[in-house]
Image (tube, rainbow, N blue to C red):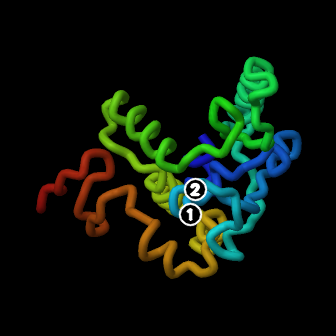
Amino acid sequence: MDGLTCGLRPGELLGLGWDNVDVDQGLLRVSRAVNRVGAQVQLGPTKTASSRRQLRLPAAAENALRDHRARPLAQQRLMGEHWQDLGLVFPTGRGSLLDPANLRRSLRTVTEQAGLGRWHPHELRHSVASLLSAAGVPLEEVADVLGHASTRVTYATYRHRTTPRRPPGRWTSCCYRPEPDI
């Protein structure tokens, strides 16, 4: 849910700690990321300085995080002394860092089973940028949400048209048929 509503990079999503989330205030602070360095999965800095940001949580994400909070706590009780308490929002079943490859594999499985094809977590960022743009959010604000230092990358790479291009007045608004020439 956070990937789709907040536009987080996969590593940022996996690096979220409960100390970065304030569901009562509706805020999420991106300050670190999970990265693969050789064969190791490590918690470290975000990709860039502008990637460190605070975001307002949409209501759907707030509610999802409230509901999700109980899962790691239940798993922690189940694992007992074998639990590795890193305070992560999205840990493995043992509390440790989740490998970004596992996130990719899980999302791919879910989207294929839902009949949506093969999705990569980064496509959620593209969706956020496109949906925000379609809703009229200024490009500068979309860039801030995605953690981009400028609008250049946001515009060129992430923002995709959600409606087809059509000449004004030449197409009907509901079904994209050419209007009859009179």
Secondary structure beneath dot 2 equals strand
Q: What label sits on residue 37 in the rendered view?
A: 1
Residue 167 shows in the view: yes
Given the image, on which type of amino acid does mark 2 rest?
Gln
Q: Nearer the viewer, residue 90 or 180?
A: 90
Given the image, on which type of amino acid does mark 1 rest?
Val
Q: Judge whether 107 appears above or below 6 on screen.
A: above
* Percent x, y of residue 161: 38, 62
Q: Residue furthest right?
A: 24
Secondary structure beneath dot 1 equals strand
> Quadrant of residue 164 in the image?
bottom left
Quick one: quadrant of the C terminus? Answer: bottom left
Residue that label 2 marks: 40
Residue drawn at x 72%, y 40% is 89
Q: Residue furthest top?
A: 78
Q: Residue furthest left?
A: 181
The answer to whether marks 2 and 1 mark residues whose Cβ atoms lie closer than 8 Å is yes
Q: Residues within 10 Å of mark 2 (few under 14, many from 20)?
A: few
Q: Residues within 10 Å of mark 1 (few under 14, many from 20)?
A: few
Q: Judge whether 36 appears above or below 5 on screen.
A: below
Residue drawn at x 33%, y 34% is 112
Count of numbered marks: 2
* Percent x, y of residue 97: 65, 45
Residue drawn at x 32%, y 51% is 173
